[in-house]
Amino acid sequence: MRILVHSVMVCFLATNAFGQSPQGTDPNEPFRPPLDPLSLKLDANNDGELSTEELSKAPAVLQALDLNKDGKLTIEELLPGFQERRPGFGRPDTMGAGRGPNRVEQKLTEKHDADKNGYLDPIERQKALAEVQIFGGGGGRPGGRPGGPAAQSGSTGPKVSPNDVKNFPDLSLYDSTILRTIFIEFDTDTWEDEMAKFKNTDVEMPATVIVDGTEYPLVGVKFRGQSSFGHVPAGSKRSLNLSMDLIDGDQKLYGYKTLNLLNCNGDASFLSSILFSQLASDYLPTPKANMVKVVINGESWGIYSNVQQFNKDFLKEFYGTTAGARWKVAGSPQADGGLRYLGDDIAPYRQRFEIKSRDDDDSWNALIHLCKVLNETPIENLPTALEPLLNVDGVLRFLAIDVTVVNSDGYWTRASDYSIYLDPRGTFHILPHDMNESFRGGGPKGEGFPGPPPEQLGAPADGLPPGGQFGRPQGFGRPGGRGPGGPGHGGPTLDPLVGLDSERMPLRSRLLAVPQYRKLYLQYLRTIAEKNLAHKNLTPLIAHYRNLVDSEVQIDTRKMLSYDAFANATAPLQNNQAAAPGSINEFIGQRRDFLLKHEEISAVAVLDIKRPTILRPRVVEGDTGVKVAISEFLASNKRTNKDPQGEFEDWIELVNYDSTDVDLSGMFLTDDDDDLYKWKIPANTIIKAGGYLIIWADEDGGDEGLHANFKLSKDGESIILTNQDVIVDRLKYGPQISEVSTGRIAGDNGEMKKLRPTPASPNRLID
C-alpha cells in the first residue's frame, strides 16, 4: 500500500496547488479541478478538498478499501455499489476522465434492504451506515461559505403539533396566499446525522408526513443541494427532498409526488425563488414556488421555500404529456454545461448533463445533434438549421430573464443550473431550474470580485476553449448576488450583453449573433424591465410574504441569517417611494432603471406578451394516409402468451392493411386521452405489408423488444395511435375478462368484438 499512499499524496499536493484561487478569492470559484475517484474516498466531508486530517487517515482508508489484501486497488474495490454510468466520470471505461458537476451516488438501498420492502428500516440503515463510513461518504462541512463568515449552528425550535396549526385542505400545494405547515416524523432522533451520512447515496430516510391533518406514510426524505448542504453546519436548516411515492407509486401530495424544500442559503428574504417564479411564469413554463413551515419530530425548523420539481408532473402540467427526455444541468464552479459541441461520443455529455428520464442513446444523440448544429452552423444559416430542433423564442425569453434578475447561478455566469426538455416531437426547450440566487446585488458602489488575469487561467482542460474557465465568464468574479456587486460584476448594472464572445455559452454567443434573435432578446429585456420590474408588480408580493412569515422568521431558530437581515431585505418602499438600502425593492428599482436606459434596449419596442411559449400539441382526427390500425388487445393476460422475457403481460396488436411496408418511427401509442404522446414507437420499427406487430403494455421499457411505458386497465380506458398531430386510430373499451381479447373482425365495419386471443395472427371470434 506504500505506493498507493504516495500517489494520493502527490494528488493531494497537486490539488492544493491548483486549487488555490488567486488573490485569496472564494475557493469555490473555477480554479479547482475536481478530485479524482480515489481522492473522493479520502474527502470525508465532501468539500472538494483534502485536509491535513483527511490525509493523515489515508493509509487506514486505503487499507480498508483493499478487500483482498493484495496491496492493490481494483475498480471493483474502489467503486463498490456505484451505478454503472457514473455522472461526472462517464462510463466505466472512461472513469476518471469526467470533469462535470454531477457527483457519484453510492447504491446501498437494494443491497441492505433485507426484507425487500423498498426502504431501509433502522437496523438495515445501521448496516448501510457502516459501509458509508468505511468509504468516506456523507458528512458535510463544518459550515460557512468558503472565504466568508462561518454559518452558526441552529438551536432547538418551538414545539408544534398538528393541532396547533391551521389546515388548508382545499387550497393547492403552491397557493401563495397561505403558509402551510408540513410535519415530518422520523423513526429516530438521529435523523439529521443519518441523512447527512447518506447524502451521496441512494438511501432515503422513511418518514410519516402530515399535511392539513392527513397522514402520508413511508415518504422518502433526503438532504438535497450542493452548497446549500456542504456550507451549512449540522443543526442549521438544510434543504430537503421529499419523495411522496417512495413505496406507493400513487401517493401524491395535492397532485405532486416530489417536494423540494429549500433552505434559502444566503437569501435573507427567503424570496428569491418565489420572485423569479412569479416573473418568469409570464414568459416560460417555470417551477412554482411558495413558502411553507416545516416541523420535524415535533420541533419547528422554520420557513422553507417550496419549489416545484422538474419531473413528469411538471411536464404533464405545462406540456400536456409525460413523454420526452429531461436533463438537469447541475450547478458547480467547474460546470461546463452550456451546450458546446464536444464531438459525437456520448461520454463527455454524460459528464455535464444528468439525464432524469429514461437513459437511452437516442435521447443523447439528439442532444449531441443540437449541440453540433448550434455550434458549427454558419451564423447566416443558423435560424433555418436550428429552429426545427430548438424552441428559439423560448430560449431568448430564458436568456433575458436570466440576466434581468441577475441570476448568479444562471446560464450567463456559469453555463449551468437550468433544465433541458426534449418533447416527443423532437423540439428542445430550455427552462429555469435554480432560482434562489436572483434579485440580489447590493448596488453600484459595492465591491466586486474581479476575475483572474489571463495568465492564471492555465491551459485548456478536457475540451474547454482556450483561456476558458469552468466558472464565471472571463473578467467576472462572483456576482453581487452573494453580496454587494460592483458595475459589471453581477449587481444592478450587469451588462445585459455579457458573454457574447464566450464559446462556453453558445446559447448567448451564437444565438445573439443572429440579428433578428438579438433584436427579439433586447425586446424581451425591455418588456420585462418595463412591465415586470415595475414596483407595482413585485413590491406588493414582497410585502405580502413579509407579512405572512414575519412572526415565524422572528422565532426561527434554524435560519442562517438574522431577522434584521430579513427585515432589511424585505423592507417596503418609503412614503416618498424610496427603497431601503440593500433591500430587494432597491435592487428592482436600480436594475429597472439601468436596463431601460441601456442604449440598445431603449431603442426597441415593448412586446405584448399574452402567455408563455408552450408548444402544447393540438391533435385532431383525420386521414394520415397511414393504413395501420389497432387490431386487437388483451388487457388481462394471466396465462395466454408470454413476452420475450417470459412474463405474462398485457399487449396491443397493430395491423398493416396496406400492400407496402409501413415505418412506424415517430408515431405514438397512449392509454390517456390527455397525454397523446405518452409512448414513442422506436425508430426503424417496421410493420410488414399485411402483417401484425405486438407491443407489450407492461411499463418494462428497459427490456428487449417493444414495451410501452403504460399498462392496460382491465376496468376499461382508451388506446390511441397518433402520427404527428393526427390521430390514426382510437379504441375505447369497457371492463375486460381475463384471457379474452377485444378487437375487430375484417369487414365488420370496425365494430369491437370479444375474441379468442390470436396475437400476430388474424382475429377470431370466440366459438
Image (cartoon, helix red, strand yellow):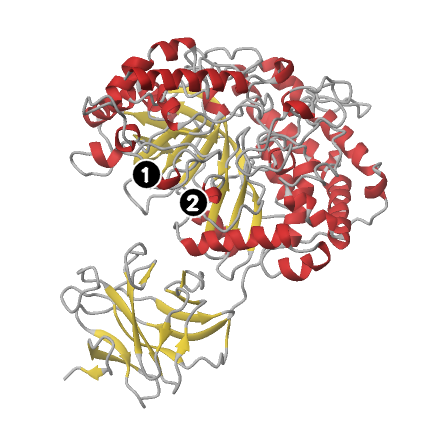
Residue 318 shows in this picture: no
556 left or right, relative to 162: right
**Residue type at numbered disc 1:** Gln
Residue sticking out furthest to the front: 3
In the image, which disc is placed on residue 83? 1
Q: In this view, does 388 lie above or below 228?
A: below
State the separation of the CA atoms marked 1 and 2: 14 Å
Residue to which mark 2 is pinned: 356
Q: Are marks 1 and 2 in contact (CB under 8 Å)?
A: no
Tag 2's secondary structure? loop
Q: Position of residue 170 (x, y in %)?
A: 45, 42
Q: Position of residue 579 (x, y in %)?
A: 76, 23
Residue in the picture at 65% in, 36% down = 412
Q: Where is residue 677 in the image (x, y as percent from the top left)?
A: 45, 62
Q: In this view, does 83 lie above or below 428?
A: above
Residue in the picture at 63% in, 30% down = 472
Tag 1's secondary structure? loop
| Along the viewing direction, whichever of 59 and 327 lies nearer the viewer | 59
Residue in the picture at 57% in, 30% down = 436
Residue 626: quarter of image = bottom left
Residue in the picture at 52% in, 60% down = 426
Residue 294 shows in this picture: yes
Image quadrant occupied by the N terminus: top left
In the image, which disc is placed on residue 714? none
